[in-house]
């Protein structure tokens, strides 16, 4: 059962257009942000209570990971009802309250949308199974007969992102083996058939439901995956996960997705307040990503090429230049992101040697990782465009790399040959207080175990400490908002710098970032505004410490 609630008033900043071009957007992973009812699981009541923290931090918008009704086979990315809230998170009235309170604080709300697949508990899929072969509802998913003498083999060689074949065989109502259905992720997540008009109509209706609720936009999960190549052709090799991000696959980044997003853009244009679409689109190149943000499609796309770049000046400069160059022809802003709910936190990635991927189980050098993470944050926030912050990175949180195997809940951890499955480490509930039950997360513990000493990194412990990572983020976002030359645009002028140092200007602003492990002396570009670590300027020169970024007014 679903409910329709009145849309809230527009946020205080609602008269501004194109707010998303320079927005700093904060990702809330609801189950790990704050627990309002003491059951050990984060919820919407907890999010609502902690909105003032995000206002004080200085972000512009909040992106909420899925809170829909779901069996939680994949932490809510298996949706059973797109118009209902899962009871573990609250109710539609709670969602309405979050939206209203956020708007009252001048914050915008972006919700996650999961259109590539549903839960196997979705009404459509359950009825398709119950009705058996020939059911019209089966046409809304990818049901196919198997290969082999008795249909005992999958219809093609596609592999699940979570490991194993991307197909599961059904049992017909009479108990005999039946057709197979496609699931690019877990078997509990059957893929929709986006060639079917009912699927397209349903999601336009879902968009309108949440827009009527007052949300300011949608982050579109697996935006590159909706359309599959005609005929579902074989790939012809195994270990297909290794091909992702390098090759165009028959189930990812097909040109047909763009017509879908053009129709969604038309739906958003019916609403006031400059609503936005954000693509999670894993593509082989940033140029392919730019196709998703052409003027009549989405507004932003995540820059995964930047997220995966090592802390190296030459590599960073290359991906910054290519990102800006790819976005210019389509008039979209570049976006920058260092962490999210699917990858090891950058304070831990940068603590380890490069080349280990984005899901790690080794803590590395904690002090080095934090120093680089702080420097990387100032560099990211100085770049033209919009930036994303993952909850807890403002506290300098590391990944929890030593979770016992029995505590892990990432579904891909329990499946062979899929993703590494170590995403739980970045999903451990964040600390709010120095001590107390679950360090202020809630009164009833936490769904993933928090490490000893977690409270030393809490909001309470860091507030007011001028050397803390939290106060660095607050100062950076305040400066970013007030400093001419920061934020929107695509202007960036590289200036001469020693090897291993990035230096650029933007109008009356300059940034210098030393990515090396040794101090480097350079001429001070101007008046120092902010630094990621202790820096001294004397005689018109500055010695940039190792792994340090400095902002300047020029």
Image: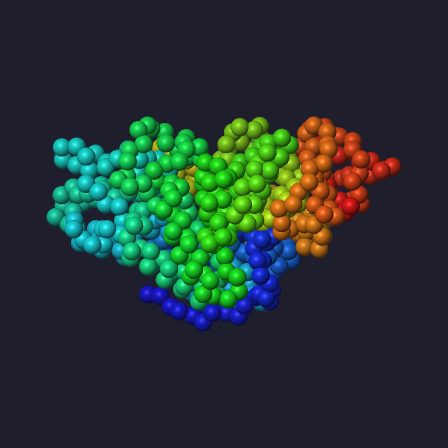
Q: Quadrant of residue 55?
A: bottom right
Q: Is residue 286 visible?
A: yes
Residue ID at (36%, 57%)? 203
Left or right of residue 498, residue 275 in this image: left
**Above or below, comparing residue 83 to residue 405 in the picture:** below
Residue at the bottom extreme, as displayed: 6
**Above or below, comparing residue 49 to residue 220 in the picture:** below
Measuring from the top left, give residue 469's x and y in whole percent.
66, 45
Left or right of residue 45, residue 131 in this image: left
Left or right of residue 473, residue 40 in this image: left
Measuring from the top left, give residue 184's x and y in whole percent.
34, 41
Labels in figure, total = 0
**Image quarter (top left, top right, bottom left or bottom right) of the N terminus:** bottom left
Residue nearest the observer in this picture, 370 or 191? 191
Residue nearest the observer in this picture, 337 or 465? 337
Residue ID at (19%, 43%)? 179
Measuring from the top left, give residue 514's x and y in whole percent.
70, 34
Q: Quadrant of residue 315?
A: top right
Residue ID at (41%, 63%)? 208
Residue nearest the observer in this picture, 303 or 70? 303
Left or right of residue 392, residue 181 in this image: left
């Amino acid at each position: 059962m679903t409910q329709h609630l009145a849309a809230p008033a527009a946020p205080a900043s609602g008269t501004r257009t194109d707010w998303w071009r320079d927005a700093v957007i904060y990702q809330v992973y609801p189950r790990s942000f704050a627990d309002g009812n003491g059951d050990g699981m984060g919820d919407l009541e907890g999010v609502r209570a902690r909105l003032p923290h995000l206002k004080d931090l200085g972000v512009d918008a909040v992106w909420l990971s899925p809170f829909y009704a779901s069996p939680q086979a994949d932490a809510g990315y298996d949706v059973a009802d797109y118009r209902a809230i899962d009871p573990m998170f609250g109710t539609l009235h709670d969602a309405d309250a979050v939206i209203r309170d956020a708007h009252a604080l001048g914050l915008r709300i972006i919700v996650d949308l999961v259109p590539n697949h549903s839960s196997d508990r979705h009404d459509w899929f359950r009825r398709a199974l119950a009705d058996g072969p020939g059911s019209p509802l089966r046409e809304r998913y990818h049901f196919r007969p198997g290969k082999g003498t008795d249909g005992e083999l999958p219809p093609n060689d596609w592999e699940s992102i979570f490991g194993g074949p991307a197909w599961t065989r059904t049992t017909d109502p009479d108990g005999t083996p039946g057709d197979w259905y496609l699931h690019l992720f877990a078997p509990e997540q059957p893929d929709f058939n986006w060639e079917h008009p009912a699927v397209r109509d349903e999601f336009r209706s879902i968009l309108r439901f949440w827009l009527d609720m007052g949300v300011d936009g949608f982050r579109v999960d697996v935006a590159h995956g909706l359309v599959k190549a005609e005929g579902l052709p074989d790939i012809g090799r195994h270990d297909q996960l290794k091909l992702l991000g390098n090759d165009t696959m028959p189930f990812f980044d097909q040109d047909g997705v763009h017509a879908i997003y053009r129709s969604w853009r038309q739906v958003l244009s019916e609403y006031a307040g400059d609503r936005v679409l954000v693509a999670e689109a894993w593509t082989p190149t940033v140029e392919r990503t730019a196709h998703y943000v052409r003027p009549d499609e989405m507004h932003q796309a995540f820059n995964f090429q930047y997220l995966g770049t090592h802390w190296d000046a030459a590599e960073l400069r290359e991906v910054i230049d290519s990102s800006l160059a790819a976005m210019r022809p389509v008039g979209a802003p570049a976006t920058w992101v260092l962490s999210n709910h699917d990858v090891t936190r950058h304070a831990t990635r940068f603590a380890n040697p490069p080349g280990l991927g984005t899901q790690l189980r080794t803590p590395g050098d904690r002090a080095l990782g934090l120093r680089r993470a702080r420097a990387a944050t100032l560099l990211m926030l100085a770049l033209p465009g919009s930036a994303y912050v993952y909850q807890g990175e403002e506290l300098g949180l590391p990944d929890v790399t030593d979770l016992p195997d029995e505590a892990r809940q990432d579904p891909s951890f329990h499946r062979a040959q899929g993703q590494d499955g170590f995403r739980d480490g970045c999903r451990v509930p964040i600390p709010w207080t120095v001590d107390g039950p679950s360090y202020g997360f809630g009164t009833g513990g936490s769904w993933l175990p928090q490490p000893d000493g977690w409270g030393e990194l809490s909001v309470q412990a860091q507030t007011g400490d001028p050397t803390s990572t939290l106060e660095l983020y607050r100062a950076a976002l305040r400066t970013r908002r007030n400093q001419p030359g920061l934020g929107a645009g695509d202007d960036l002028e590289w200036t001469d710098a020693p090897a291993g140092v990035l230096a650029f200007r933007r109008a009356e602003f300059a940034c210098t970032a030393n990515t090396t492990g040794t101090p480097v002396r350079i001429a001070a570009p101007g008046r120092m505004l902010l630094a990621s670590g202790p820096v001294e300027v004397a005689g018109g020169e500055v010695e940039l410490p190792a792994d340090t970024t400095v902002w300047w007014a020029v």
